[in-house]
Image (cartoon, rainbow, N blue to C red):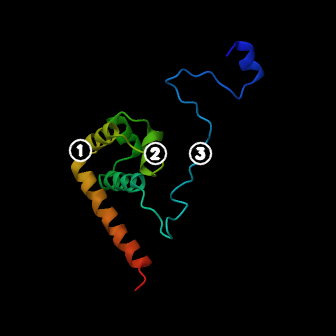
């Protein structure tokens, strides 16, 4: 396809044989806003954020203290605690280190909370 053909027909693009041309855009809805089968979804990022905040507050530390020690921006740490951002394993390790808590302990607390919420959801949506 020549440069002139591309300009005159912008809907077509030049791709090599190994490239796939994207032709559709898919909008992904906020899963917390849309119940699945009538149930609200448990989002790991929210539970992880709540557990991080709980542990930080137990230590009487500020977001600023932990963000400095973890070398994570204050805004990003705040978004993590509010469940607005997904944390990478490296970031979780840095925050856990700053909180002087093992990653396994954080994840055990998250697992316990997820199990508690699953039980609550099962009770709430049971048909018995």
Q: Is residue 23 above or below residue 37?
A: above
Between marks 3 and 1 in the image, the one whose residue lies nearer the viewer: 3
Could you tell me which residue is drawn at 51 percent across and 59 percent down? 32
Q: Which residue is mark 3?
A: 26
SS label for mark 3: loop
Which percent across, then down, holds residue 23? 62, 36
Name the image quarter holding the N terminus: top right
- Binning the other alpha carbons within 10 Å of mark 3 as few (below 14), some (14 to 19) or many (20 upward) gives few
Residue 87, located in which quarter of the rendered image? top left
Q: Are marks 1 and 2 in contact (CB under 8 Å)?
A: no
For the question of whether residue 48 can be seen, the reply is yes
Q: Secondary structure at mark 2?
A: loop
Please rate how many residues cluster around mark 1, counting C-alpha atoms within 10 Å: few if below 14, some from 14 to 19, many from 20. few
Q: Earlier in the sequence, mark 3 or mark 1?
A: 3
How far from the left and from the top, in percent, is residue 15? 58, 22
Marks 2 and 3, the one that precedes in the sequence = 3
Q: What number is the disc on residue 85? A: 2
Of 83 and 114, the residue lying toward us: 114
For the point 75% across and 14% down, the residue is 4
**What is the quadrant of residue 95 in the picture?**
top left
| In this rendering, position of residue 119 left or right of residue 12 | left
Q: Residue at x 40, y 41 (%)?
A: 64
Q: What residue is pinned by disc 1?
A: 100
In the depicted view, which residue is nearer to us: 4 or 99?
Answer: 4
Rounded to the nearest angstrom, the CA distance separating label 3 from label 1 is: 41 Å
């Amino acid at each position: 396809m020549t440069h002139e053909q591309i300009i005159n027909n912008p809907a077509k693009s030049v791709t090599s044989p190994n490239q796939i041309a994207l032709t559709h855009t898919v909008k992904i809805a906020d899963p917390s806003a849309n119940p699945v089968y009538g149930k609200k979804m448990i989002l790991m990022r929210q539970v992880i954020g709540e557990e991080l905040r709980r542990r930080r507050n137990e230590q009487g530390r500020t977001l600023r203290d932990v963000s400095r020690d973890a070398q994570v921006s204050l805004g990003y740490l705040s978004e993590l605690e509010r469940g607005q951002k997904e944390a990478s394993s490296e970031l979780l390790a840095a925050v856990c280190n700053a909180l002087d808590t093992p990653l396994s302990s954080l994840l055990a607390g998250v697992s316990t909370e997820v199990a508690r919420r699953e039980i609550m959801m099962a009770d709430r949506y049971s048909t018995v």
